[in-house]
Image (cartoon, grey):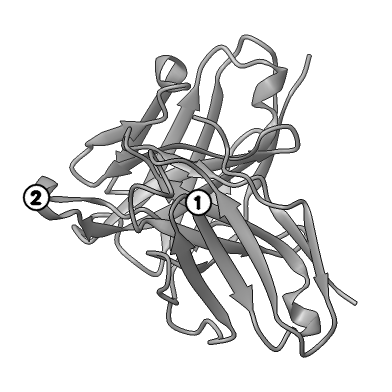
């Protein structure tokens, strides 16, 4: 049974870097059938897609976060990671990692599905000095 | 990208049917059949209950059904049960190849 587990510091200072890792068990992150993503949930903004990555290291980012964001993948450890730079209080949220199946979009080809079919339990990250 | 609009709360008695709306634009809900719905119990992660407007993942009750008309998608829960009390979020793929979520609806079973 697939499990995703977020880990990292729960408290980050303003202007510093938020770093989270998602460890996948019960399935291979190297599978060509899936993409791996991040979503966050804050009281003020609800659910927000952050971005996702394929085993080939192709990345897809939310334009509103792209300038501060890096998502990477480590297939040897079956993990993928999120780095969000220059954080502020508005980045305080529960961060979820999730899986997206590969999806056929017709003439444009295969990309991450328009939905997230498995989620980690989530991790609260607070940005505060 | 603005969040999709959902009613803040919907309630119903056990056994009744309720419907939650999710309104977007032609650039998201209205443009594609890429609407999904998630159920979230307090302190838990969202759980996918519908995708591509009408499809249920394996293991999800057939009491959950979806539909779409123009820029508005809908989730219907029939035979409402106490365990259905949760927050529900819609989501849509967009013309910008991004994902947008709804504002969320709290379902109360009376």
The quadrant the N terminus of chain A occupies is bottom left
Which sits in the foreground, B73 or A93?
B73
Same-subunit check for callouts 2 and 1: no
In this picture, residue A48 sits left or right of residue A104: right
Dot 1, crowdedness within 10 Å: few (<14), some or many (≥20)? many
Specify the quadrant of the image occupied by residue A46. top right
Question: Disc 2 marks which residue?
Answer: A107
Question: Residue, x 66% and y 60% (percent of image)?
Answer: B88
Specify the quadrant of the image occupied by residue B79. bottom right
Chain for mark 1? Answer: B
Element at badge 2?
helix
Q: Is residue A110 above or below residue A25?
A: above
In this picture, residue A96 sits left or right of residue A38: right
Residues at badges 2 and 1 in contact (C-beta under 8 Å)?
no
Which sits in the foreground, A25 or A112?
A112
Q: Is residue B47 visible?
A: no
Q: Is residue B33 above or below residue A77?
A: below
Question: Residue, x 59% and y 85% (percent of image)?
Answer: B63
Dot 2, crowdedness within 10 Å: few (<14), some or many (≥20)? few
Question: Disc 1 marks which residue?
Answer: B91
Q: How far from the left and from the top, in percent, is residue B42?
A: 78, 60
Q: How far from the left and from the top, in percent, is residue B17?
A: 70, 81
Which sits in the foreground, A72 or B74?
B74
Element at badge 1?
strand
Q: How far from the left and from the top, in percent, is residue B44?
A: 69, 60
Question: Residue, x 18% and y 42% (percent of image)?
Answer: A56
Chain for mark 2? Answer: A
Q: Is residue A58 above or below residue B50?
A: above
Q: Is residue B16 visible?
A: yes
């Amino acid at each position: 049974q697939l499990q995703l587990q977020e880990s990292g510091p729960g408290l980050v200072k303003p202007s510093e870097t938020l770093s989270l890792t998602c460890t996948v068990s019960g399935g291979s992150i190297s599978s060509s059938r899936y993409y791996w993503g991040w979503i966050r949930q804050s009281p003020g903004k609800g659910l927000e897609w952050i971005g996702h990555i394929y085993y080939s290291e192709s990345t897809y980012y939310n334009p509103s976060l792209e300038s501060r964001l890096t998502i990477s993948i480590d297939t040897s450890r079956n993990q993928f990671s999120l780095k969000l730079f220059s954080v502020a209080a508005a980045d305080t949220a529960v961060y979820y990692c999730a899986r997206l199946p590969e999806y056929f979009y017709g003439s444009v080809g295969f990309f991450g599905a328009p939905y997230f079919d498995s989620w980690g339990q989530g991790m609260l990250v607070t940005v505060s000095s | 990208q603005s969040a999709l609009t959902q009613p803040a709360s919907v309630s119903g008695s056990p056994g009744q049917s309720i419907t939650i709306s999710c309104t977007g634009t032609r650039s998201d809900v209205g443009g594609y059949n890429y609407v999904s719905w998630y159920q979230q119990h307090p302190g838990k992660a969202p759980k996918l209950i519908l995708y591509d407007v009408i499809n249920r993942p394996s293991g999800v009750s057939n009491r959950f059904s979806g539909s779409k008309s123009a820029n508005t998608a809908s989730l219907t829960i029939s035979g409402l049960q106490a365990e259905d009390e949760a927050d529900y979020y819609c989501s849509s793929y967009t013309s910008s190849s991004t994902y947008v979520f709804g504002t969320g609806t709290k379902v109360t079973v009376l």
